Amino acid sequence: MQVSKFIGFDEALRFVVENVRPSKPETIPLSEGVGFVIAEALQARVSCPSLASSLKDGYAVVSKDVENASDGIPSRLRVIGRMEAGTGDRLSITSGHAVEVTTGAPLPEGADAVLAVEFTHREGDEISCYRDAGPGRNILAAGADAALGEIVAIKGTRLTPPLVGLAAASGVDRVSVFPRPKVSVLATGTEIVAPGLPLRPGQLYASNMVTLRSWLKQFNMECSCLIAPDEAEAIRDAARRAVEVSDVLITSGGAWKSDRDLTVNVLRDMGLELLFRRVRMGPGKAAAFGFIKDTPVFCLPGGPPSNEMAFLQLALPGLLAMAGLPSAPFSTLEAILTEEVSGDEDWTQFIHADWVDQDRRRHVTPIGLTSRLQSQARATALIRIPEGTTNFRKGEEIEIQILHRPMGLC
């Protein structure tokens, strides 16, 4: 299906997110799983801890033996042994006795509390106890962190370092995850030159390609880059190679209406089925999205602001959805606008901006530079003026997308 007219930004974003599919799950070592979304629930294979264990260095005791212990009237117990973490030694105690334990040591049979070492004084095989220790004090019950068979993470959970640690303690060593899609970026244009090569008059370096690759790297996605001149056969050959080795094809340039804008038409000849071709958004209106068989294809315009904005607002959400992640790539915050901004009632407008925390309030200022690349490079936020709204007034509190934290903020 081709949508020949301009479609709204919200509709275009919905088309992308609803039509891409999560990548085929892969099984990887748990230690490499941080940041991935799990494709199957994680189930504990062992109980952690396997036995009740001590949370302190001290003495395992029968709680009733020390319930009245104080500095003035200590309770005295006989020490009958020592247990350490990781050893197979097992002891048992009865009233009037104690066992010295280290942090992580299994609890002796008969003990129901651990008195921390700082509340004791030892002389030979006897200790004086100066504090009480009620039942369960300083004890980690068996299976307290994870019980055998317990679900420690449901499908669709993103793995964080602490969750990886919990899974490891539960006996999990490999996980099924939705991999991040492998992306090919195809930059088109006879005037485009790869960075590092000499420039001839009229040529320019492929900054869009490098920018997209850098964004992909920031989101931990693998990227291959190709450059093709404005020749149908060259574009076709490069696109064919890209589709063969990647999960997603992103093209840069050649998406508008001039005689040299060949990319979309060449891809259509290759079987590209478009869901939309132009979007009521600025910058980024000459954006197209569709599929070559099962491969998602994003055709982005060549102007730097349009290229990056179409990627951030349309392509990147689709890539994240394929990885099983939330499709909104950036967090949003409320900020006070320092000057008025205007848009077009019939379009969704995005404006590069810079935000700061000042006087305990968050402020955002549109970047009014004439240089397109410098505006992009200096932006820490984006202001979105939605379709149907013509302007935001100075002093108004608005929602902004956070691209980066300002210098000095964590």
Image (cartoon, rainbow, N blue to C red):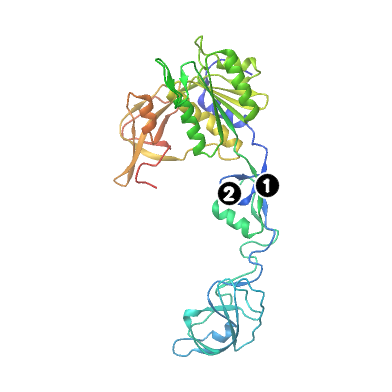
Q: Is residue 202 visible?
A: yes
Q: Find disc 2 in the rendering and name its residue.
A: 159
Relative to 108, 73 lies left or right: left
Seen from the viewer's position, the closer of residues 18 and 204 is: 204
> Which corner quadrant of the image does residue 343 belong to?
top left
Q: Find disc 1 in the rendering and name its residue.
A: 40
Q: Which amino acid does label 1 sit on?
A: Glu
Residue visible at 29% across and 46% down? 359
Residue found farthest to the top? 259
Image quadrant occupied by the N terminus: top right
Seen from the viewer's position, the closer of residues 7 and 171 is: 171
Residue visible at 64% across and 73% down? 87
Relative to 173, 124 lies left or right: left
Q: Which amino acid does label 2 sit on?
A: Leu
Q: How far apart are marks 2 and 1 (CA)?
A: 12 Å
Tag 1 or tag 2, which sits nearer the N-term? 1
On screen, residue 390 above or below 401: above
Q: What element carries label 2?
A: loop
Residue visible at 54% across and 84% down? 67
Residue visible at 64% across and 84% down? 93
